[in-house]
Amino acid sequence: MNWIPISEQLPTPGMPVLVAYGKKVLRAAHAPPLTLSEDAWGNFEPDGGEYDEATDACYWPEGWYEWNEHEETHWALDNDPTHWMPLPLTPNV
């Protein structure tokens, strides 16, 4: 697997991937505007998400979020990543 520059392609919205910025690598997901609803992805803390009157739904604000698989909160990244790659497959044990 190779790193994909953010400037060339973004991952599927809400899909956990590995991201890199500087020397940091972590698991994160991207939220495009009005794409990931709070119903599907959980509530956005602390102020709530972006409300869309046309769909009567709240959405996560656009940005990158650290993906915590077993926690309810996905924290916004302090910096925008420069590259991403799909998560590796788990071993078949």
Image (spheres, rainbow, N blue to C red):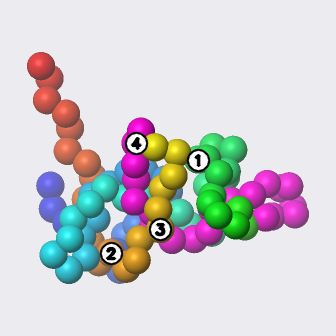
Residue at (40, 42) in percent of width and height: 69
Cα distance in 3D space between marks 1 and 3: 14 Å
Q: Which mark is residue 81?
A: 2
Q: Amino acid at mark 1?
A: Trp
**Which of the two marks, 3 or 2, is nearer to us in this view?**
3
In three-dimensional space, the C-alpha distance between marks 3 and 2, rounded to whole angstroms, equals: 12 Å
Residue 45 visible, this orientation: yes
Q: Quadrant of the C terminus?
A: top left
As drawn, the label of residue 83 is: none
Report the Cα–Cα distance between label 3 and label 4.
Answer: 15 Å
Q: Earlier in the sequence, mark 3 or mark 2?
A: 3
Q: Which residue is at the front of the view, 70 or 54?
A: 70
Rate crowding at label 2 as few (under 14), some (14 to 19) or many (20 or more) other CA atoms within 10 Å.
Answer: some
Q: Is residue 93 above or below residue 3?
A: above
The question of residue 38 being in magenta is answered with: no
Task: Find disc 4 in the rendering and name its residue.
Answer: 69
Residue 41 percent coordinates (x, y): 58, 47
Q: Specify the amino acid type for callout 2.
A: Pro
Q: Is residue 65 magenta?
A: yes
Q: Which residue is mark 3?
A: 76
Segment colored magenta: 51-70
Q: Residue at x 48, y 56 (%)?
A: 74
Left or right, 87 with reference to 7: left
Camera-nearest label, 1 or 4 = 4
Image-quadrant location for residue 44: bottom right
From the image, tell me which residue sits under label 1.
41
Question: What crowding class fits label 4: few (fewer than 14 Cα within 10 Å), some (14-19), or many (20 or more)?
Answer: few
Circle 1 crowding by C-alpha within 10 Å: few under 14, some 14–19, many from 20: some
Could you say whether the residue bearing mark 3 is in a helix, strand or loop?
loop
Q: CA distance from mark 2 to mark 1?
A: 21 Å
Identified by mark 3, the residue type is: Ala
Closer to the N terminus: mark 1 or mark 3? Answer: 1
